[in-house]
Structure formats: C-alpha cells, structure tokens
Image: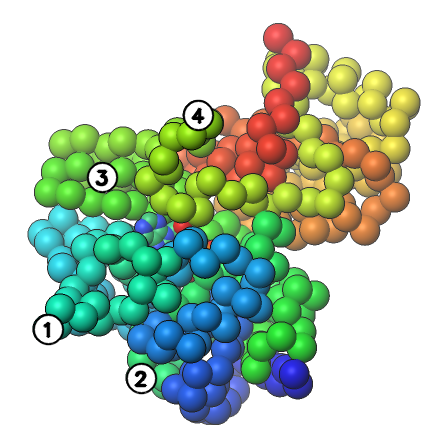
Amino acid sequence: MNTETIVIRSESDLHQLKRAGDILRSSGLVAFPTETVYGLGGNALDKAASKKIYAAKGRPSDNPLIVHIATPEEAEKYCVTNELYYELAASFMPGPLTVILPKKYVDGIPVVPDETTGGLDSVAIRCPADPVAHKLIVSAGVPIAAPSANTSGSPSPTSAEHVIHDLMGKIDMIIDGGESVFGLESTVVRISENTIYLLRPGAVTAEQLSVFADELIIADEHLKEGERPLSPGMKYKHYAPAKPLYLVSGDEDQILNFLLEKQDTEKCAIICYDEDAQVLSPDNLFLLGKKNDLLSHAHRLFDFLRKTDITDASVIYARLPDKEGIGLALYNRLIRASGHNIINLK
Ligand code: TXA
Ligand code: MG
C-alpha cells in the first residue's frame, strides 16, 4: 500500500486535513499526532476500519480501542455518562485523560461496534488537546478510534519517524505534526459513582484524580497470574526494546557504582539523568533530563527505548523511577518494558 505523508507545522498547513478526513470516512487509516503519543486512527463507528487497525498493528483483537472525540459532550452519543465524567472533563478535557464508560445502545444495537471495543460493554473516551488531532476529528465528522500508532508490543511512537518505521506501507496516511509534547500515553480511568479506578497512569496523576472521588484504586501493575485484568491492555507485554532491559534501584552511590562497573565489563546502554553524565562515561548514555524534570523524562523515554535498539549495546540499564506524580507513569512503562526485571541494590 502507498502511504501518503503530510507535514503540519502551522495554521497554513491545516487545509491538508480535509483529505485526511475523507480517508477516515471511507474506512481508511490515518496516523496522527496527539499531545501524548501518535495515534493510528480509523472511523470508530466502522467495523471494517477497526479491523484494519488491529491488522496494521498486529494487535490482539480483544484489546479495545480508545474513541477520540472533539468535545466532552459528544460522549453522550456513544456512552452512558454521569456526573463524575463531567467533573473530570471540566478539569482535564481536552487533555491526556481517557475515561471508560458503559456503552450506549439504540434499539438493542451498540452505537460503537464490538469490533472497536474488543467485544466489551464499555467505551473508552478521550478528547485530545493537540490542535491537529482536534481538527482531524472535526474534519472527519466521525469519532476516531485510535490505539498508539506502533507495532503491537513496541514502544509507542512520539514522532512521525517512529510511525514511519513501524507502519509505512500498511496504512493510508501519516500526519507529521512534530514531536508529541508529553510523550507517554493518556491516563486511563474507569469510573463509578464515587470510585475512580486508575488503569493506566499518565500525565493526569493519581494525586490530581484523588480529589474527585471517595476512593481511588490504582490497578496493580504486578498482576498475579490468572487474575483477570481490569483493562485488557494490561496483560500484554508492552513498550519492549529489542534488548534486555534492567531497572536499577538503590542509594545514589550504589546505583552509580553499579553502572560504572557495568560500563567497564559489559557493552551496555544506560538510560539515566543529566547529572549522571558527570560520573559515567559518555558511551551509549541516554540522558532523560535533570533528575527532577519528570516532564522531560516522559518526553524522551520512548524515543530512547527505540534508540537503544540501534546501538551496539547488548543490554540496557535504566534507573527505576519514584512513583510520585508523573513518576508513576514512568515507573509503569519501564516496569512493563523490562518485563519486571528489577535489580535492587539495597
Ligand atoms: O494517549 C493515548 O491514550 C493514545 C493516543 C493515541 O490517544 N492511545 C493509546 O491507545 O494509548 P492504546 O490502544 O495503545 O491503549 C489503550 C488502552 C489499552 O490498554 C486498552 O486495553 C485500554 O486503553 N482500553 C481501551 N478501551 C477500554 C475499555 N473499554 N475497557 C478497559 N480498557 C480499555
Ligand atoms: Mg498502545
């Protein structure tokens, strides 16, 4: 398949989205930028488009897709909303929050087909803040089902280059809108009247969400075997670089001594903080930003996981993040990218 690529950097480039909207309305697939990661979009109401999304990604068909809408109120057409949804929407939409709500049925038929929701009785709703994503949804005139635009299992794409690497020749169009501002996927929550279940941590943090409900339950990333996950996506290995990844935790001195020794004895790549460059040798060092600059870490992490693949290193070490604030999202992605490989030096 011939994949068309368009570049959008300013207002004057936006007219190109008309064609992208046409493609989406005729069951085609368009990869597009959002403030979190790039999405692989298809018409959420079109079974054929959803099937194509699973095929292009190589994604298991029981892993449901997020439905992207232009305004929070549009959720009414597809879901059964509640007060808590609108409270969250007032604070975090448009933005990097996905809310799972019960499906809406008309004459016994779900408005959003089972092909889009992996056969589930619920719909995940997200209203992206990225202006290109917003204008694409408006131009399409239909809700857009979009998982991250990567091959299933690999790190989510945060630039058009990543999407081109994974999906060129498999989809109709790639919209290059520059680097994703945040760099990790949206926060995913399921809500009932007074409880918020945090299924995937992201830019909207557990601390921010907790004030909206009596109870906030954080899904355990260390799912026990055989336990049914709240979100199907949680059971799959994710974000994995091609080489083994180990997460290092301990006191500062312990971590640095460990990494120095590894640099002496192994061909390794290290994902760490700017400050570490004063101690470690510069070979295959990937600097996430200053230690406290978690937004910079989020912005660079997936790009680094991909870049370590093209180094001559045979193993990757990364620092295990703290779980506070956005740290929980970084922790969650790294834990899963490493397959829970943690080296605790304490
Ligand atoms: O930031 C994001 O959310 C990006 C951009 C493109 O919007 N999208 C994204 O989609 O990360 P995806 O498919 O890679 O991750 C969606 C996650 C999966 O873990 C999926 O299982 C879960 O959301 N999910 C979707 N619909 C669900 C539902 N009805 N019930 C439970 N979990 C659901
Ligand atoms: Mg994904």
Q: Are marks 2 and 4 in contact (CB under 8 Å)?
A: no
Q: Residue at x 42, y 71 (%)?
A: 50
Q: Are marks 4 and 1 in contact (CB under 8 Å)?
A: no
| Mark toward the start of the polypeptide (3 vs 1) | 1
| Mark toward the start of the polypeptide (3 vs 4) | 3
Circle 2: element type:
loop
Q: Which is nearer the eye, 17 or 169?
A: 169
Q: Which disc is residue 196 wearing?
A: 3
Q: Where's residue 208, x and y in %?
A: 28, 39
Q: Is residue 134 visible?
A: no
Mark 1 belongs to which amino acid? Asp
Q: Residue furthest right?
A: 265
Q: Where's residue 52, x and y in %?
A: 50, 73
Q: Which disc is residue 107 wearing?
A: 1
| Mark toward the start of the polypeptide (2 vs 4) | 2
Q: Which residue is mark 4?
A: 224
Q: Where's residue 164, x and y in %?
A: 67, 70
Q: Of tags 2 and 4, which is closer to the observer?
A: 4
Mark 2 belongs to which amino acid? Gly
Above or below, comparing residue 74 to residue 267 in the picture:
below
Mark 3 belongs to which amino acid? Ile
Q: Residue at x 79, y 34 (%)?
A: 315
Q: Of tags 3 and 4, which is closer to the observer?
A: 4
Q: Of tags 4 and 1, which is closer to the observer?
A: 1
Q: Is mark 3 within 8 Å of ligand 1?
A: no
Mark 4 residue crowding within 10 angstroms, few (<14) / some (14–19) / many (20+): few
